[in-house]
Amino acid sequence: MNQKLIIDIAKSLLLARWRQTLVAAVGVTFSIMMFIALLGFMTGLNDLLDGLILNRTAHVRIFKEVKPNPFQPADNQNEIGYNFVNSIKPSGNGLSLDNTAAILSALKNDSRVLGVSPKVTAQVFYNVGNVDVTGVINGIDVEAESKLFHFKDYVLDGNYLDLKNVPNSIILGKAAAEKMLANIGDVVQVTTPKGDRQMLKVVGFFQSGLQELDKVQSYCSLSTTQKLLGKPVNYITDMSVKLLDLTLAPKVAKEYSALFDTDTEDIQTANSQFETGSSVRSIISYAVGITLLIVAGFGIYNILNMMIYEKMDTIAILKATGFSGRDVKLIFTTIATSIGLFGGMFGLLFGFLLSSVIDQIPFNTAALPTIKTYPINYNIKYYVIGIIFSLITTYLAGLFPAQKASKIDPVDIIRGK
C-alpha cells in the first residue's frame, strides 16, 4: 500500500483523538526530560568527584616502603637450619629512592608517560607557641604538579608560583592555617623529627576539600623541603607518574616495580572503592531513566489499545477496502513512533533547558572550594541514548496493539453492527 496514504491515515487518527495523543506525548516528553537531567546531573557529580580524587592522584606512584630485608645474614650462617633472630630493624637509606636521575630520565623517555612529578614527603611539627602540631610537608616540583595534578586550582589565596620564586616559602592547608591563626606573609616555624628547625614564609592557602587532610598537609618547593631535611638535591621519596592511557596503570606499575626495584601503586588499586561508588551511581541513574521511559511506554500502550477499540469500524472499513493486516499494523506502529519521536525531541529540548537551570544554581561549600554551581554533564551520547530509547519504547508499546488491530476480521465487525 502507498506509504504516503498510510502516513496520512495515521495522522488523521492521531488528530482525531488529539487529547489522548497529547497526553501520550507529554508522558514521553517528561520521561526523556527527566532522563536527560538526571543522567547529566549524576554523571556530572561523578566527574566532580573524579576530579577531586582521581585528578589529584598519580596514575602510577613510585615510592620506597620501609621494611626489613627478608633475607638476613644469619640465615646463611646457622648450620642447624633455624634462625632465632627477632625484632629485625630496617636498614639502608629509608624512604629515599635510589638512582633518581636515571629513573626520571627513563620515565620522561617512555612514550606512555604524559609527565612525572617528583616529590619529597617530610613529617614535621608546626611550632605554635608552646604547642607542637603534627604536620606533613610535601616538597613538589611546582610547575609539574600544577600541570599534571591541577595543584593551582586548589590554592585559594596567594600565588602558587611563589613556592618556586620565594625562598623558604610554604603554602599551608587552610584548616592548618586557621588552627595556627596564620595569615599570608606570616612566618611559621617547623621542626623535623631530628630536631632541625626552619622558619618558613606563608605565601598561600591550600584547600583540597578533605578537612582532616587540610589540617596537617602543606606544600613547599623541592629544594626547600630537601634543605629542611638536610638532604642533597637528588633526595626524592616519591614520583607521581601520569600516563596518556589510564587503563595501562596496573601493567605499567608492575613493570616499573621490577625495572627500578621499588614499590609501586596504580590508581585503580589506590581508588578501587571510589571507582565502585561511581559505577553504582551511574547504574542507578540509567535504571531510573529507563524506568521512566518504560512507564511512558505503558501509557502509550493503553492509549493505543483504547484507540483500537474505538476505531473498530474504521479498521474494518480499511480492511474491507483493500488494506492488508500488515498495512493496518504499520498505521498503528507509525502512530506510536510518531508520539515517541515528537515527545522525545521535546524531551531532549526541555531536558537541556532543565540541565542548564540546574547548572546555574549556586553550590558553595567549604568542602569543595573549586565548585561554584551544581555539576552537569552535557555529553551528547546521553541525548542520543534518550531519543533511541524513546523510539524503541514507543514502538514496542504500539506493536502489540497494532498486531491486535491487524488480526481484526472486517466481516465480524460489520455483521456485529
Image (tube, rainbow, N blue to C red):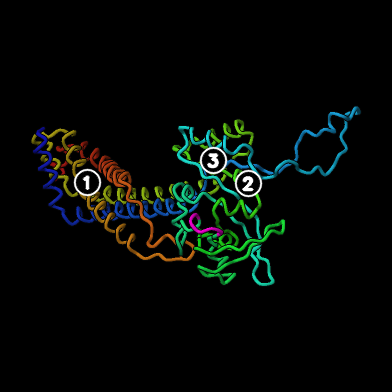
> Is residue 209 depicted above or below 401 in this figure?
below
Residue at image mark 1: 341
Between 405 and 373, the one lying in front of the other is: 373
Density class for disc 2 (Cα within 10 Å; few <14, some 14-19, many ≥20) is few
Q: Answer left or right for 393 relative to 213.
A: left
Alpha carbon of mark 2 to alpha carbon of mark 1: how far? 69 Å
Whichever of labels 3 and 2 marks the residue nearer the N terminus, that label is 3
Residue 309 makes an appearance in the image: no
- The image quarter containing residue 213 is bottom right
Residue 23 is at least partly visible in this image: yes
Using the numbered discs, state the Cα–Cα distance from disc 3 to disc 1 in whole angstroms. Answer: 47 Å
Q: What are the residue bounds of the magenta stretch?
A: 164-168
Is 244 a magenta residue? no
Q: Principal SS element in the magenta part?
A: loop
Q: Which mark is residue 60?
A: 3
Q: Which residue is mark 2?
A: 232
Question: Under tag 2, what secondary structure?
Answer: loop
Instruction: Residue 167: say if magenta.
Output: yes
**Mark 1 belongs to which amino acid?**
Leu
